[in-house]
């Protein structure tokens, strides 16, 4: 466990809030539409990644993989980012953020659980109160861009009406029916436009078109050589 200091947006005013991050959960296969969900499963199957045992499924990784860094280091050229909303529980409240489940695809082909531990999980430092957006949750937009071969391209985009509702997502993953204090849960993603591929930079955002605001972040991907 470790502390992260976020800025909680309240009607345009940012209030610092330090949260103890005790566990990180990566929820997968969280699509509300089985057709779209199966498209993403097929996308990964094309890379040799087996279908999940259940949908949704909840993977664990080290909480310390979560970072605000603007650059991460990865081994080899087989990793890629995925934009996701992030839910964080704290003292009966739930906050909403945005992050990237950066994953090593080569490792994912033989163990999804291990692949989740291989890469840092960049997050934006801003949070919203869930209660401020739950009434128009389905209208929120997740979006990402990737810099590939020097060109910035739209990589993912979709509204959250394609994802499981928040209450369902939490209830299916936690027996007590609530998000535990200090739990940061990544909520799933959309299929990549043009297919999954590596990038030298990854940028992402969560847009609230009703309250006219965004949470955004970006990071460079530094590739380390693989020896032996």
Image (cartoon, rainbow, N blue to C red):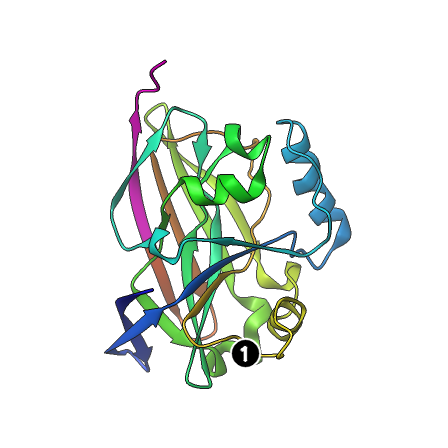
Q: Secondary structure at mark 1?
A: helix
Q: Residues within 10 Å of mark 1 (few under 14, many from 20)?
A: some
Residue farthest toward the top in the current orientation of the protein:
228
Residue farthest toward the right in the current orientation of the protein:
35
Image quadrant holding the N terminus, namely: bottom left
Q: Tell me, yes or no, whether the highlighted magenta stretch contains residue 224.
A: yes
Q: Tell me, yes or no, whether the highlighted magenta stretch contains residue 21.
A: no
Question: Residue 220: image x %, image y %?
Answer: 28, 38
Left-right relation of 156 to 90? right
Q: Main secondary structure of the magenta part?
A: strand
Q: Nearer the viewer, residue 210 or 68?
A: 68
Please name the residue shown 32% across and 82% down the image: 10
Question: Residue 172: image x %, image y %?
Answer: 67, 68
Tell how many labels.
Answer: 1
Left-right relation of 75 to 6? right
Question: Residue 209: image x %, image y %?
Answer: 47, 68
Please name the residue shown 65% across and 51% down the image: 29
Please name the residue shown 36% across and 51% down the image: 65
The answer to whether residue 198 shows anywhere in this view is yes
Per the image, the residue denoted by label 1 is 134
When the figure is inspected, residue 56 is found, relative to residue 11, above or below; the finding is: above
Q: Would you identify the image quadrant in which residue 215 lies?
A: bottom left
Magenta-drawn segment: 217-228
When the figure is inspected, residue 104 is found, relative to residue 28, above or below; the finding is: above
């Amino acid at each position: 466990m470790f502390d992260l200091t976020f800025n909680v947006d309240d009607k345009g005013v940012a209030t610092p809030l330090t949260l103890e991050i005790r566990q990180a959960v990566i929820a997968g296969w969280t699509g509300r539409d089985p057709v779209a969900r199966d498209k993403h499963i097929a996308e990964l199957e094309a890379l040799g990644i087996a279908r999940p045992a259940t949908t949704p499924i909840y993977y664990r990784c080290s909480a310390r993989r979560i970072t605000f860094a603007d650059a991460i280091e990865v081994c080899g050229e087989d990793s890629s980012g995925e934009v996701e909303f992030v839910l964080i529980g704290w003292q009966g409240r739930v906050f909403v953020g945005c992050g990237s489940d950066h994953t090593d695809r080569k490792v994912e082909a033989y163990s999804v659980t291990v692949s989740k531990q291989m890469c840092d999980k960049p997050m934006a430092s801003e949070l919203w109160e869930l209660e401020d957006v739950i009434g128009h949750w389905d209208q929120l937009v997740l979006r990402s861009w990737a810099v590939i071969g020097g060109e910035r391209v739209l990589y993912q985009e979709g509204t959250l009406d394609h994802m499981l509702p928040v209450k369902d997502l939490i209830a299916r993953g936690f027996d007590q029916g609530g998000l535990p204090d200090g739990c940061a849960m990544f909520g799933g993603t959309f299929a990549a436009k043009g297919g999954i591929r590596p990038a030298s930079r990854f940028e992402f955002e969560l847009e609230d078109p009703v309250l006219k605001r965004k949470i955004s972040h970006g990071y460079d991907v530094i590739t380390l050589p693989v020896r032996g």
